[in-house]
Amino acid sequence: MHGLVDRVLLDGRSLTGADVERIARMEVAVDVDRDAREHVRRAREAALAVAERRPVYGLSTGVGALREVEVQEAGEHGMRLLRSHAACTGPVEDPAVVRATLAVRLNQLLAGGSGVRTDVVDALAETLATASMPYVHRYGALGTGDLSPLAEIGLTVAGELPWRVGGVPPTTFAAGEALAFMSSNALTVATATLASRAVTRVLEASHAVAALSFLALQGNAEAYAAAVHDARPHDGSVRVAAELRRLLGPPAPSRRIQDPFALRAVPQVNGAAVEALHRVRDVLDVEMNAAVENPLVVTDGGPTVLHHGQFHATEVASALDSARLAVSSVTALSTGRLAALFEPDLTGLSVFLASGPAGASGLLVLEYVAHDVLAEVQHAATPVTTGTAVISRGLEDHASFATQAARFTTDLAELVPTVLGCELVAAVRALRAAPDRLVDAPVREAFAIADAALPKGTEDRPCRDDIAVAADLLPELAALAFP
């Protein structure tokens, strides 16, 4: 990591999702802003000064339902907190998610509201700099804090748990630092950031796939006209309609006065997803640059410690819920275009785009595959904000499921490409059968990419590899979108 040329400066204020992804992929090195580090030092002094005058949650008291209990030997109490909270279980998290979590938590600490020492900041920075990695297991977090996963990281940094990769010299957590370190949704934010960026790329690719289906079906471009979308100017539909006009070039003659919804409503359906994912990006940008710790240490205007509910991650959960629902609708619309591509009355081509002897099945079974995966997508799109958890003897009586929303978004990023891959396979086969429908516009580049990669044969055969190849092409098609 030290040898990387590109670097990201963490200052607690300016981290972006793109930065997090590059750090997660080990494409950039990380530096710590000196002023932010000094802010951390001053906040530690402030926290200790306030604790001499009044109880401070987690520093001089227990936590959760034990908030009124005055603790003795505060430093050892902090280490006990880490040990008792490091209970997460299940599969080990993906390395990219762990690196993203370390970056997000380090940046949040640099916002200067936690009251930890600079030693803790330096230990996380060194962990990233040396490409070291703790074990982080999946289950044990709710939308009021990734307590258990962060406790696992904390105990690893403290030298009490083994490192998964590498390692740094142990840093013992002093009084008040254990709760301050755990008091964050860093794993949730990291997971949501990587997942939502992956879903955004899939969505961008879907515009190019839809444009290919539009050509194969000889759609009516009136549905994408600027005047139509200016008359009801939702930002997402305006942008998607403009993108489709760019991809398709000047309107060509259509087979119909009006198309099925699967073509006609692409700007509206995809546009809602575009807007929802923009909202996710904005929410996560706030979260990864926020001092979310409870209590919050304030140094301006004299040292103060404020107890609050800023750890509550409803903003994250509701934004992710909206995005997953919108992307589920995009996925369903793709299955509608797939069905249209198999209908001779709409394409003027053979049923199921089959060739060969009578009764050949062609691509019939792609609908089964697509709808199987669509069912999984719709399950993963189930909102989590309809439920909450009551924990810690009822004191924490409204814990959200933001963590689960982030995991479900990861599921979507893995599922949706298969559905779009099925559509892409069918659209390419249809355009190969009717090459006169291709136009001299950017969408032709999308066809060329897919045509070069997908097998040429049309005989009845297993299509598993075709779908996989098509799904793998989506990042390349996404690069054609929204230049």
Image (cartoon, rainbow, N blue to C red):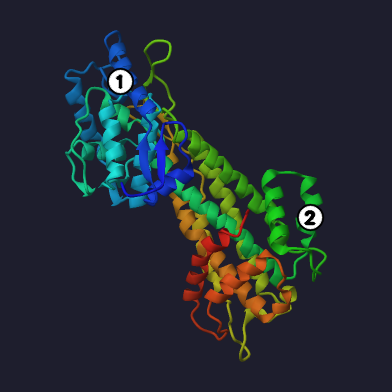
User: Which residue is the site of mark 2?
Assistant: 225
Against 350, residue 314 (above or below) is above
Identify residue type, mark 2. Answer: Ala
Q: Quadrant of the C terminus?
A: bottom right
Dot in front, 2 or 1: 1
User: In front here: 53 or 352?
Assistant: 53
Q: Percent position (x, y) of residue 430? A: 65, 76
Question: Horizontally, is 357 left or right of 130 in the view?
Answer: right
User: In front here: 477 or 255?
Assistant: 477
- Mark 1 neighbour class, 10 Å CA radius: few under 14, some 14 to 19, many 20 or more: many
Which residue, as the protein is rendered here, is positioned at the far bottom? 357
| Dot 2: element | loop
Residue 115 visible in image: yes
The residue at 53%/42% (across/down) is: 281
Q: Which label sits on residue 44?
A: 1
Against 382, residue 76 (above or below) is above
The alpha-carbon separation of the residues under discs 2 and 1 comes to: 58 Å
Identify residue type, mark 1. Answer: Arg
Q: Mark 2 or mark 1, which has the lower sequence index?
A: 1
| Dot 1: element | helix
Q: Which label sits on residue 431?
A: none
